[in-house]
Amino acid sequence: MKPTVTFEPQKIEPKWQKYWEEQGLFKAMEGDLSQKMDPGFCRDDTQKFYLLEMFPYPSGRIHMGHVRNYTIGDVVARFLRMRGKNVLHPMGWDAFGMPAENAAIKNKTHPAKWTKENIATMRDQLKRMGFSYDWDREVATCDPEYYRWEQQIFIEMFEKGLAYKKQSSVNWCESCQTVLANEQVEQGRCWRCENSVIQRPLEQWFLKITAYAEELLQETYRLPGWPERVLTMQRDWIGKSIGANARFQVEGSGEEIEIFTTRPDTLYGVTFLSLAAEHPLVDRLIKDPNKKQEIQKFREKVRSINHEKRMSEEYEKEGIPLGVNVIHPLTSEKVPLFVANFVLMEYGTGAVMAVPAHDQRDFDFAKKYGLPIKEVIVPPVGAIHELHPQSAYVDPGIMIHSSQFDGMDSEAAKTAIVAHLEKLNKGKSKTTYKLRDWGISRQRYWGTPIPILYCDKCGAVPEKIENLPVKLPLDVEFTGEGGSPLKKIESFMHAKCPTCNGPARRETDTMDTFMESSWYFLRYCSPKFDQGPFEKKAAEYWMPVDQYIGGIEHAVLHLLYSRFFTKVLRDLGYISISEPFKNLLTQGMVIKDGAKMSKSKGNVVDPEYLIEKYGADTARLFCLFASPPEKDLDWNDAAVEGAFRFLKRVWQLVTVGPHGNYEDEKFWLHKTIKRVTEDLERFQFNTAIAALMEFYNFLSEKEKVSQESIEHFVLLISPFTPHFAEELWSLLGKKESLLKESWPTYDPAALKLDKVTVVVQINGKLRGKAELSPEVTQEEVLEVIKTDAKIQGYIEGKQVVKTIFVPGKLLNIVVK
Ligand code: ANZ
Ligand code: ZN
């Protein structure tokens, strides 16, 4: 070995990247692999493994969050390949979206050009990180060869009634000048720009995700490979409520109001009814112009407030009495009717039976407007309960003031009262979901055109499949004013009706970019397929994704939409699976100075700086060692230095030699193989690296180190720091890439060489220690200490009363 070779990452990294690419070592193949692969490879086509990291938005440059996410994925990919898995590890670009358009308005560059340049830069950066992607499968969602299939899927959904257009009150972001889906509103703010979101009526396209609400919910109980936290967030978002609808007659009119309640047990406690301000009945019931005006004002006021806030308990309750009574379906009592600001038109029936004694919002409302509070449930044990003056009693209990249901348990009364309503034909049991249909229209340019035409004769008609893609025109001017620039392009706007050939107008809205990311994982299975979105055979082979890795921020957006799309594609006959992602790992954030690393906080570390100063291997090692993947990673300059120093020391050890006897290293080597392997299986990269560091410490104290230990060390560290390992591998005289080696396995027999310290006590006092096998018996310990003069000194001439033995730890001899 030549000890003069120094560790120069800037030299070796590009060399190995080039070599891997030329050799095509990361290509994923289907079918009989023995025909296709170099005999050095041990991959098995029955052992497919689809490993996927969430693809990036091509914003310009990669950031530390990408580096972390993709390093985690890359270690797993490399580890599994060496274990003989046939790994699919692709990468691509979520390339539509607003930043491109905003850049176009600001810098006068075309979004297509801006995006293309960013992709080139970021592809180059990812390559310089040494990530083992199959670049032949690269996909960019702004490519017409990608989005044409999305348009086809949309048309098929339209034909099945799963895509439809309606007028509705939408979330509107003034600063982005676009509609946002409910999932994209976070605490009343735009997920992208953090501006306050207002409500606005608009015609737009929806996908019927609600048709899959129950299945989406049920399958969360069959995804054991997902973090419980994400599943809970999805369940809450779907928000299933089991309850009942009941009908109340409006006094003096033929009208009826249907309410939805999850608490039919409280029906006898109703003291008024509340309608949403937009409820259609309001206009029918109110004739007085002054009242009409008052209600109109109220509507405008509540409309601008977002749903989440309106439903919260803290929100100040307000309402208007309508001067009309409704009749209780069971008692025939008259109770007044209100409109109230906390009732939403979009949930249940837009009408609520108010039970102030048992619902806090109704309680607050009743207090404010001096309405009666009638208690119908009391706590199950204890003396007579007095209504707490400050709050509603919301828990289950015993029924009172409820006619024939008095004395019943309130949970049982739920079913009994619904049955009674059903018998009287005044109501029925009903399940409701919070999940709303997914609004996908965006009034923006840089997105997939919605392939619909409007014809005066035929209405909304989908484009013919053979005419797809409906291409986004590129000769556009960006002023940032006057809505979508597509409206100004005559050649795009005016087209022929696919049905009657008459003149028709094209839809100018584009699709929410979450559409593209809802099926890109399927496209990777056969990215060049030109007969459909993907080749069925390839998708059946690779899907589902065995391991998906990405940020927790997508828990209800992307991860729910992708599950929905997979089910739709199944029902359209494209694929037979129902769930896209078998296992999910959500990695933590990268933190610096106590805050998430972000441009707006001004605390970013550019990965480029790391690559230049230390090399990609150090950057990778730092990310993996600094914390377990699910936890946040705290940026630490000293730890980066530490990772770099560790690599330099290992380099020294491997390149300097000299090599000696293996026997006494055997236990340490096998223990390390076991730890690294098991930690990698559990994604505990930090402890795997710690095991390698301990092994290094052991080896570095020895005069001579064996060839075996050194070679294995290099193989074990290779998934983490691949260039470094390849270079050392070749310096060890190997002719082929170590990617063709199998992952080391450990010999359980070698682990038996392990020694533990057994403490020897005489009458509870420490008198000696012995290094022995963990399996040593009491008799063997007694035998060993016979040769220890010091211990024998305490025993001689005394009588042994008893011995206490803790295997592998301690022997206490009691003498007198
Ligand atoms: C009477 C009642 C009594 C209610 C009681 C609750 C407690 P979840 O569980 O979230 O599904 N509600 C129904 N439709 C509504 C709407 N459009 N806007 C605002 N609130 C609405 O909530 C269901 C409960 O929320 C329903 O049960 C209804 O109030 C209210 F002691 O009915 B409840
Ligand atoms: Zn027509």
Image (spheres, rainbow, N blue to C red):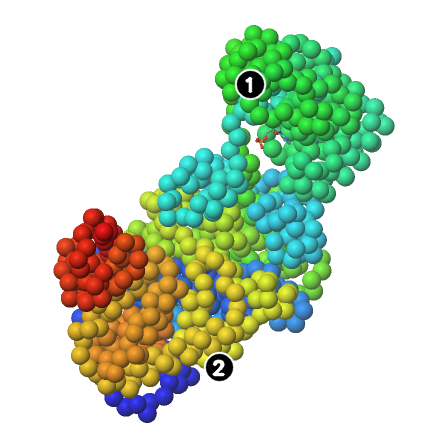
Task: Tell which of 178 and 313 is nearer to you.
Answer: 313
Query: Residue at position x 50%, y 60% from top?
Result: 632
Given residues 722 and 387, the one toward you in this image is 387
Q: Looking at the rendering, in which quadrant would you find the N terminus? A: bottom left
Amino acid type, residue under disc 1 in the picture = Val
Label 2 sits on residue: 613
Density class for disc 1 (Cα within 10 Å; few <14, some 14-19, many ≥20) is few
| Residue 93 visible in this rendered orientation of the protein | no
Instruction: Please identify, in this view, whether the residue under mark 1 or under mark 2 is nearer the observer.
Output: 1
- Give left or right: position of 795 versus 389: left
Side of 212 where 591 appears, left or right:
right
Residue at the spot 37% in from the left edge and 63% down from the top edge: 687
**Type of amino acid at the residue the image marks with label 2:** Lys
Q: Do the residues labelled 1 and 2 touch (CB within 8 Å)?
A: no
Which of the numbered marks, if any, corresponds to residue 381?
A: 1
Whether residue 157 is visible to the viewer of this picture, yes or no, is yes
* Residue at image point 45% right, 63% down: 627
Helix, strand, or loop for circle 2? helix
